[in-house]
Image (spheres, rainbow, N blue to C red):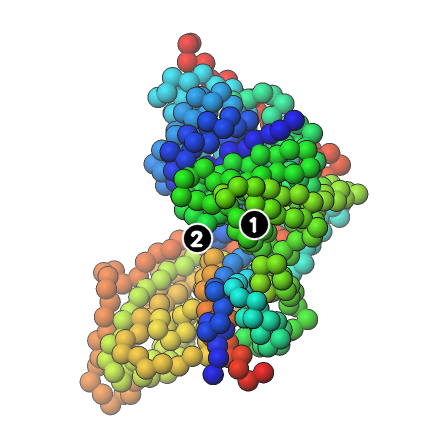
Amino acid sequence: MKTRVLVPSGALGLNYDKVALYNGLKQKPDIIAIDGGSTDSGPSYLGQGISKYSRASTKAEWKGLMEAREVANIPLLIGTAGTCGTDTAVDWFLKITQEIARELNQSLKIVIIRCSQSNKEVINAYSDQKIEPLPNAPELSIDVISRCTNIVALAGVEQVIDALKEKPDIIIAGRTTDTAIIAALPIMRGIDPGTAWHGAKIAECGALCTTNPLSGVIMVEFDFDNFTVEPMHVDAKATPKTVSAHMLYENTNPYILFEPGGYLDTKESTYKAETNKKVRVTGAKWNKSDKYTVKLEGTILTGFQNISITILRNNRYVKKAKEWADDICLQCTKLIRCRLELDDHEFSIELRLIGQNASFGKLEVKKATLFEIGVMTLVTAQTQQLADEISQMLNPFLLHHPLTKSEELPTFSFPFSPADIQRGSIYSFCFHHTLKLNDPLEIFRKEVINIDQSL
Amino acid sequence: MTKVYDIVESVRSKNAGPFWLTIDIFCGKQNAFKVLCKNLTNKMISDIFCINKEQIQRYEIQTLHVIKFSLPRPCVQGSPDDRDMHGATWAELIYEIDISAY
């Protein structure tokens, strides 16, 4: 059965074109699916279990989609709700959905998929050797797992299909692969899985696979062993080149994509222009694996950080900025060891010279004549109190440190008062691993919530 | 001196998850693709990133005139020494490679 999936944009929070969205509705989609996040903005969001995008933007864009869903009378699905897809992010997103439902007077059946995992259960799985590293994975241990602030497992199509079987109006999924939310309905309705996953990968970032990436909205129509992709904006075109090039995007291998339960192989795929803005794709293969695995993501707290910005404009100091910065690190480190009685591994100070090496550090090879340098100072320690102490000890150096003892005390620019800024807790990703499951639904939790406005 | 930016359409660098970096060089014309396939070696890439050249995956995609390199991220995304959360700026180091000497 032909299945049409309308994708409004690469992520909720990036905005979409309303006219293009309603152009899409005219083509009678079977579902609207949108991604809500990824790891791409770094570990802090998963670390804290929060959204990267503003609540007001999320609400405004989601409201537009909830209105479109009601007009079309089809399910609306979001994956990786609230950027990181933890239970806390899902709850935040559910609350927004309930608020909108009240405002629009919509009675709804909502299905939630929860993907957060407890430290204890992940430790058990690790002890039972169900967790395996992917290439270039960090070292894992029971200690690391026990210190995780959040752990999520990435759901695939099986968990989304299980939610779709409830015939919901809305699905709010925790962490899912970007593609699973698009591939689920086609696979449920009998589309060849290779075709479904390939179409999903092409559509995962909305109109990024077209000539007009900012236009957002695209339609993927799945037939049994082929799919078409077409942007819904009048000024956007999908061409064989723009579509096939999307397999490269954020993917190490341009032909292979690993997903829960197997991998997609697009080596034999062909991309043909159907019209001047629509492309038909055939030939992808799905290779089912013997065991069912899902990817894990997790974060540990790595410390507390303060930063400050100092600006050097004096010609002599700009020329000798590295020497100046190195000397500050040396002298201040001595002071910290002595006054705070800390060992070197308990704190770090780093001065990055903006204009000289801030982008690449030791990988930088370029040298240019500068007249101004920004000094970004990073202080990291095990507690916020220590980060504050060290940051305050650094302050007089960053303000007045002279290149030689025999010169008049210089004063550098601080753009702010206080000069330093608390960044608070900082996090690191600690998993690049898979978890083996006996049953795809084993560790994911489904909830059904009915909202009835007539009550 | 010919640099990569003199002959290609664009270079894109992106995270492929927090632990890998992937670089797509869109050569545009067939000739630029041919020149880069021949002159841009894995050794040049490994030297820039100070890694072992065996760690680099290389793909030459004739249909798109793209050369793609995937490599372990020079530092894990978001780790204390990371300087670019989205990994996009590393493309600049590729643009600046001198390919005339080969």
Disc 2 packing (10 Å; few <14; some 14–19; many ≥20): some
Query: Could you tell me which residue is drawn at 53 percent across and 57 percent down?
Result: B15
Viewer-closest of A218 and A101? A218
Residue A94 percent across, percent down from the top left = 46, 29
Subunit of label 1 = A
Q: Is residue A356 left or right of residue A161?
A: left
Q: Judge from the rendering whether residue A10 lies leftward or rightward of residue A197; answer left or right.
A: left
Q: Residue reaching furthest top?
A: A455
In terms of secondary structure, where does tag 2 sit? strand
Q: Is residue A177 above or below residue A333?
A: above
Which chain is disc 2 placed on?
A: A
Is A100 left or right of A403, judged from the image as shown? right
Can you say whether A214 is above or below A439 in the image?
below
Secondary structure found at label 1? helix
Name the image quarter holding the N terminus of chain A: top right
Residue for point 59% across, 77% down = B39
Q: Which residue of the protein is positioned furthest toward the left in this rendering?
A: A408
Mark drawn on residue A240: 1
Which one is in front, B42 or A352? B42
Nearer the observer, A437 or A264: A264
Q: Position of residue A140 (x, y in %)?
A: 65, 55
Q: Which residue is mark 2?
A: A425
Residue at figure coordinates x 46%, y 31% from the top left? A24
Look at the image and tell me whether residue A15 can be seen: yes
Q: Amino acid at mark 2?
A: Ser
Q: Which residue corresponds to the image point at 29% horizontal and 88% vertical from the top-left?
A: A404
Residue B56 lies in quadrant: bottom right
Q: In this rendering, which labeled residue sits more in front, label 2 or label 1?
A: 1
